[in-house]
Image (tube, grey):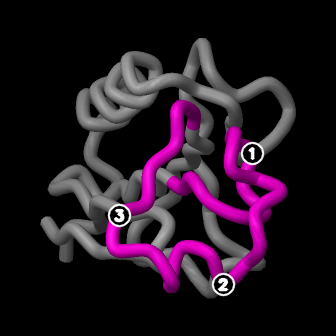
Amino acid sequence: MTISIVGHKGFQIALSNGITVSVQFGPGNYCERREEDFTAPEESDFWSSQTAEVAAFVTNSAEALSRNWVHVDGFNSGDDVVGWLDADEVVKFIGKVAAMPNRTKVA
């Protein structure tokens, strides 16, 4: 399990079940800070947002454009990324992903 900062505007958590959760809340993301300048997060000592976008993918899947995205019941509606979630909804999303069956391959 690892936790990583991504682009000064979000984070990813690689869970022990082989699924990574991405939480992003900055320029270009589906959140209240979407229209900010792309350099804004790097120029700030503290970056926050009332909403965020989330996604889940198999941890060891390929590069970003061909990731093996994971559907999360109650959240995904035809897209890999779910946007405009408040903090409570983000926590609920992470909890649902953490409870999913293991996606790691056993040798």
Tell me which segment is drawn in magenta.
24-51
| Label number found at residue 39 | 2
| Rendered image quadrant of residue 5 | bottom left
Residue depicted at x 66% and y 84%: 39
In the rendered image, the quadrant that contains the C terminus is bottom left
> Which residue is nearer to you in this view: 92 or 41?
41
Residue depicted at x 33% and y 27%: 91
Q: Indicate which disc, 2 or 1, sits on the residue closer to the N terminus.
A: 1
Give neighbour class at mark 1: few <14, some 14-19, many 20+ (Cα, 10 Å). Answer: many
The picture places residue 92, in percent across and down from the top left corner, at 36, 20
The picture places residue 37, in percent across and down from the top left corner, at 77, 73
Name the residue tied to disc 1: 30
Q: Main secondary structure of the magenta part?
A: loop
Residue depicted at x 43% and y 60%: 47
The amino acid type found where label 3 is placed reads Phe
Image side of residue 92 versus residue 10, left or right: left
Is 36 colored magenta in this rendering? yes
Q: CA distance from mark 2 to mark 3?
A: 13 Å
Q: Nearer the viewer, mark 1 or mark 3?
A: 3
Name the residue tied to disc 3: 46
Give neighbour class at mark 3: few <14, some 14-19, many 20+ (Cα, 10 Å). Answer: few
In this rendering, the answer to whether 84 lies above or below 4 is above
Q: Would you say the residues marked 2 and 1 are in contact, meaning their CB atoms lie under 8 Å apart?
A: no
